[in-house]
Amino acid sequence: MPSRAWVALIVSASINPNYVVVVKYADAASVEINRELIVNTALEKNCDWCLMIDTDMSYPPNLLDVLISRDKDVIGVPYYSQGWNDETKQSTVTPVIYDYDEKQNWHRWEEVKKTEPFKVEAVGMGIILIKTDVFKRLKRPWFFVSTYEDEATILPVGEDIKFCMKCKDAGIEVWVDPTFEDSIGHWHGYGFSKKDCR
């Protein structure tokens, strides 16, 4: 399913006279290195935007058109994956969107009820559109894995969340566009989407 989505997106973008499309397939050993390679290519080619899509995502052909029309420095989409609810001790499906509380503890959103683009602290980068000017305002490396210490333990912080934290520190807003509804799928043997969020 994700490969069909990619072909439809590329065809849609290629026939749009407003776009010159540069495709970079990165296959380095780690996600953070792949993201660095993609950004380097976007900067070398003087691109205005850098769209990153993980290979396990599905999406509609108009994805790029809609995200560009929002004119945000950084904008992703809510996509869903399995998680764990510590209170109920049950597996859950929730959006990969995070905020943190007054103690700086990170919390994953339970669901997305919003119908218009909105600001967040951090979003997973399964699908993300970033203005290339953002990378010129941030120090390298842009993407790296780190750790976060809360009250009870030390937790890993993925390259996507760390990038959003760097944006926040630089005064760059991170947005999410929820208008795609169930047309965004996150595939792990099954295409998780908003309808699976309970």
Image (spheres, rainbow, N blue to C red):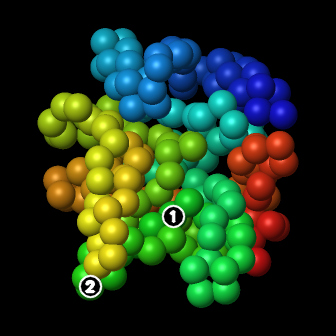
Left or right, residue 88 beside residue 196: left
Q: Earlier in the sequence, mark 1 or mark 2?
A: 1
The residue depicted at 38 percent of the width and 53 percent of the height is: 156
Task: Return the residue nearer the eye: 1 or 162.
Answer: 162
Q: Dot 2, how many residues are within 10 Å of its Cα: few (below 14), some (14-19), or many (20+)?
A: few
Q: Quadrant of residue 131?
A: top left
Q: Are marks 1 and 2 in contact (CB under 8 Å)?
A: no
Which residue corresponds to mark 1?
97
For residue 126, say whether it is visible. Answer: yes
Disc number for residue 102: 2
Residue 24 % position (x, y)? 51, 15
Measured in 3D between alpha carbons, the distance from the residue under mark 1 to the one under mark 2, in whole angstroms, is 17 Å
The residue depicted at 18 percent of the width and 58 percent of the height is: 169
Left or right, residue 114 beside residue 101: right
The residue depicted at 69 percent of the width and 37 percent of the height is: 56
User: Hey, what amino acid is under mark 1?
Assistant: Ile
For residue 42, say whether it is visible. Answer: no
Residue 40 % position (x, y)? 32, 18
